[in-house]
Image (cartoon, helix red, strand yellow):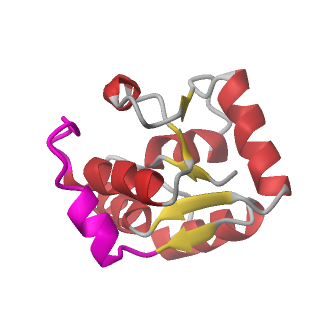
Amino acid sequence: MLSICDTHMLIWWSVDSPKLSARAREAMEKASAAGELVIADITLWEVAMLTARGRLQLPVAASVYMADLLAALRLTVLPITPAIAEASQATDIKQGDPADRLIAATARVHQAQLLSADAQFRELADLAVVY
């Protein structure tokens, strides 16, 4: 089963943050080993934006950091498709952040579990959220 990693989970994994639960870490590493760990393409933009705004301090350029994460976790990047764009507008997705809406929609369209600490995602009945 595909596992979509929310942006904050990816960052927490990369810095070995205690915020990343043991259950989420195990799910990430299991999906990575199986070649089933993915991110929505908006995650790449979100990391670059957080870095540019000073909310994420990186030891290297954002592009190098992201390339290293893609390789380390064997991540596949899923593009926004017309179906994902439409699904992101579902009224039951309460997040106002377009990135969060696209990540949830990507999980739905690909029928993937979502690795996220965001409690609002757990309110979506058809979305399996691991944290």
Residue 48: percent from the left, percent from the top? Answer: 37, 66
Residue at (42, 60) in percent of width and height: 43
Left or right of 40 in this view: 27: right
Tell me: residue 61, above or below residue 40.
Answer: below
Magenta span of residues:
79-97
Left or right of 59 in this view: 55: left
Residue 89: percent from the left, percent from the top? Answer: 17, 54
- The rendered magenta stretch, by its main secondary structure, is classed as loop
Quarter occupied by residue 16: top right
Tell me: residue 30, above or below residue 45.
Answer: above
Magenta run includes residue 100: no
Left or right of 57 in this view: 12: right
Residue at (46, 28) in percent of width and height: 117
From the viewer's side, name the closer residue of 10 and 119: 119
Q: Specify the farthest residue to the right.
A: 33
Residue at (47, 68) in percent of width and height: 62
Left or right of 59 in this view: 31: right
Do we see residue 54 in this rendering?
no
Quarter occupied by residue 99: bottom left
Quarter of the image with the C terminus in it: top right
Residue 25: percent from the left, percent from the top? Answer: 71, 34
Magenta run includes residue 90: yes
Do we see residue 19 in this rendering?
yes
